[in-house]
Image (cartoon, grey):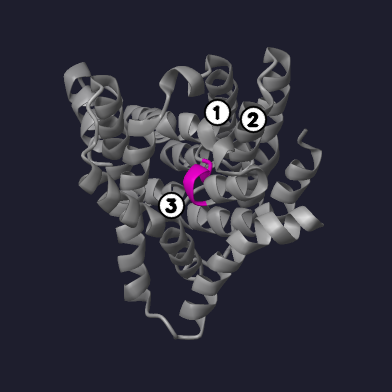
């Protein structure tokens, strides 16, 4: 119970504050859109850039962690895609969007603050290793499969251009790539620029959590309850369970094991809705899954924290 009160609820209170502010009319929807754009297009890319630029890659990029996490993510994507097709008879394009909901954990807005509050800032090395390739992997997989089912018979070069265009228009991907470029080059970020980045970064997570609450009120669960339940089961239970068993088998160090399981246990990120909206497919399922799973993760994150070593 102490973990629930001290670690999880403060994060969800910020989300709830944004939700109530918009619900009661204290903060306009147009303002929430602006806060979310600031967080996702500027502040969080700055956070990822700065974190990866300073990251000790040799210490944090444990292949056992990444293989465990992304195997679980790919399995959940596949189960979500074919589950939507076989169980619910959705179009293939809808199935890809639903699979993406099962794939994309909210690694930044929920995973970072919950892990930090539970185990301290020094425990975030594994989180940043996962986050560093999270958007490229998830968008790369989702966009590639979606473009394949949408453009069956398209030439190879045209297909590759569509995938690359979608990937490199994503600010999160650009921030990650810029961070890697600085890290690999060995160049130091000038102190004045690093200090300015730090000012923006400090606003990233609170602003994003507040905006997430404001966004969620716009998308109430309507219909598709069985599909939404499938996404929640895959995202909140199956993915972390796969990481748990694979990480245990690989003998992951405790900090990396905690980061992998907790990040996998997070609800689908708002990027799940962005992906669905980008293609105009399964938007109601995506938005409702983000809302229902985010609320449900208050309980499931607590349960995973209670059993972690």
Q: Quadrant of residue 191?
A: top left
For marks 1 and 3 on the same chain, the one whose residue lies earlier in the sequence: 1
Relative vertical location of residue 309 with respect to residue 211 in this rendering, above or below: above
- Give residue 39's position: percent from left, percent from top: 35, 57
Q: Which residues are magenta?
A: 105-109
Say whether residue 292 is magenta: no
Relative vertical location of residue 155 with respect to residue 79 in this rendering, above or below: above
- Give residue 151's position: percent from left, percent from top: 28, 30
Tag 3 residue: 273
Tag 2 residue: 255
Classify mark 1: helix, strand or loop: helix
Q: Residue at x 55, y 18 (%)?
A: 67
Q: Which mark is residue 78?
A: 1
Give the Cα distance between marks 2 and 1: 28 Å
Give the Cα distance between marks 2 and 3: 30 Å
Q: Residue at x 54, y 54 (%)?
A: 290
The answer, for residue 81, to whether it is visible in the render is no
């Amino acid at each position: 119970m102490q973990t629930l009160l001290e670690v999880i609820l403060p994060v969800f209170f910020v989300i709830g504050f944004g939700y109530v502010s918009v619900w009661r009319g204290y903060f306009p929807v147009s303002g929430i859109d602006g806060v979310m754009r600031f967080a996702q297009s500027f502040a969080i890319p700055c956070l990822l850039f700065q974190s990866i630029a300073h990251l000790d890659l040799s210490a944090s990029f444990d292949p056992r962690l990444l293989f465990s996490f992304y195997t679980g993510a790919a399995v959940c994507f596949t189960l979500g895609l074919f589950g939507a097709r076989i169980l619910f008879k959705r179009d293939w394009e809808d199935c890809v969007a639903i699979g993406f909901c099962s794939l994309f954990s909210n690694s930044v807005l929920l995973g970072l603050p919950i892990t930090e509050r539970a185990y301290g800032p020094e425990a975030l090395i594994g989180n940043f290793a996962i986050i560093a390739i999270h958007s490229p992997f998830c968008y790369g997989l989702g966009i590639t499969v979606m473009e394949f089912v949408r453009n069956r018979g398209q030439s190879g070069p045209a297909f590759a251009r569509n995938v690359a265009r979608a990937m490199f228009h994503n600010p999160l991907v650009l921030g990650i790539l810029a961070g890697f470029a600085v890290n690999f080059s060995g160049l130091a970020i000038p102190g004045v620029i690093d200090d300015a980045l730090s000012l923006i970064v400090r606003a990233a997570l609170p602003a994003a959590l507040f905006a997430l609450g404001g966004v969620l009120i716009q998308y109430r669960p309507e219909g598709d309850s069985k599909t939404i339940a499938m996404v929640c089961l895959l995202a909140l239970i199956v993915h972390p369970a796969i990481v748990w068993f694979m990480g245990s088998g690989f003998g992951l160090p405790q900090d990396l094991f905690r980061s992998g399981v907790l990040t996998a246990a997070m609800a689908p990120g708002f990027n799940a809705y962005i992906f669905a909206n980008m293609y105009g497919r399964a938007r109601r399922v995506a938005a409702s899954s983000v809302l229902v799973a985010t609320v449900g993760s208050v309980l499931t994150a607590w349960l995973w924290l209670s059993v972690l070593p």
